[in-house]
Image (spheres, rainbow, N blue to C red):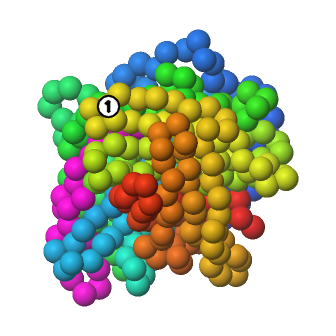
Amino acid sequence: MIARALTFLWICLSSAVSAQGFAGLGTDADGYALPSAQTALTFPTDHLSHPDFRIEWWYLTANLQGADGREYGVQWTLFRSALAPETGSGWQTPQIWMGHAALTSARTHRFAQKLARGGIGQAGVTAAPFDAFIDDWQMQSQATTGDPLDALILRARGDDFAYDLNMRAQGDLVLQGDQGFSLKSPTGEASYYYSQPFYQVSGTLTLPDGDIAVTGQAWLDHEWSSQPLNEDQDGWDWLSLHFEDGSKMMGFGLRSGSGAHFTSATWVTPVGETTAYGDGALALEPLETARVAGRDLPVRWRVTLPARGIDIVTEPLNPQSWMGTGFPYWEGPIRFSGTHSGSGYLEMTGYD
């Protein structure tokens, strides 16, 4: 009976997440809170969850080098989604949680998913210390002073992989868009969005062949909204880039039904000074596709930001970095070269 009840819960949660998916992010948000450009983000409070908004995620990606001489990528994501704007407690809460974890190399892409109902202690985000978790997957603060995100441990485990990483921020938080208010369309859909792109990482990957010591750099995003897409938008192409001189760049393009991109970018200097670029400043041009999970995906891109003299081409570490989860998408580590070089991550959603 218990097993049957748990199976039923899993099916319900999976169906709810899949039904909402990426297209659901463009549906009406009646009853939910909406972002406002007049609201300033406040830390550490805004590191926590915002249940009056419909959708939220804490998203960490890491580009790593192993003691075995190979490159690796790690993803850790905690999603929160509200099925209704009403409040509740325990099993009555409308909040559902989903975790995604992945470990990518040039030869393999391993991933896992967890689903949980909010309000029963199985998943959530807590303060003092900051801890974002779902079951035994954990992103927990180790900071004793300063911002709680200045020092983190990151843990996750799938059937055939695990990782245990320590992260130390070497710079300040970055507010995306207009002081954290990030426009997503010409008609004003938006999110609250900030990042910590300055992590230095060390730790251990566990694979079927054994443990591998790794070092590298990581990028954390926290974003929340209730209707971040216009109803005509069906997905996005997003990049986080670490330049060899220590600069950083975030850029995304949201695709409309016509295939056109609404773009946004943020340039971050090595000392944390930021410049935001609105629609049209960034250009994303697909150069090469690969057959991935039964569909053709643009895994190689030309990325230009003329205002910064950026003209680069990205290359995936593993073109088959497909997340076959409740709502599927492509997510994997990349290298880039051209006017500048470095590493980063690419995410592509809405390619059905």
Query: Is residue 111 shown above or below 81?
Result: below
Q: Does the image show residue 65? A: yes
Question: Who's the residue at 70% across and 76% down the image?
Answer: 296
**As rendered, which of 128 and 91 lies closer to the eye?**
128
**As rendered, which of 80 and 231 lies closer to the eye?**
231
Quadrant in which the N terminus is drawn: bottom right
Query: Is residue 162 shown above or below 148?
Result: below
Coordinates of residue 30 in the picture (x, y in percent):
78, 28
Question: Who's the residue at 37% across and 22% down the image?
Answer: 43
Coordinates of residue 7 in the picture (x, y in percent):
60, 68
Coordinates of residue 65 in the picture (x, y in percent):
24, 68
Q: Start and end of the magenta stretch?
A: 195-216
From the viewer's perspective, is 102 left or right of 323?
left
Coordinates of residue 254 in the picture (x, y in percent):
69, 47
From the viewer's perspective, is 304 left or right of 342?
right
Label 1 SS? loop
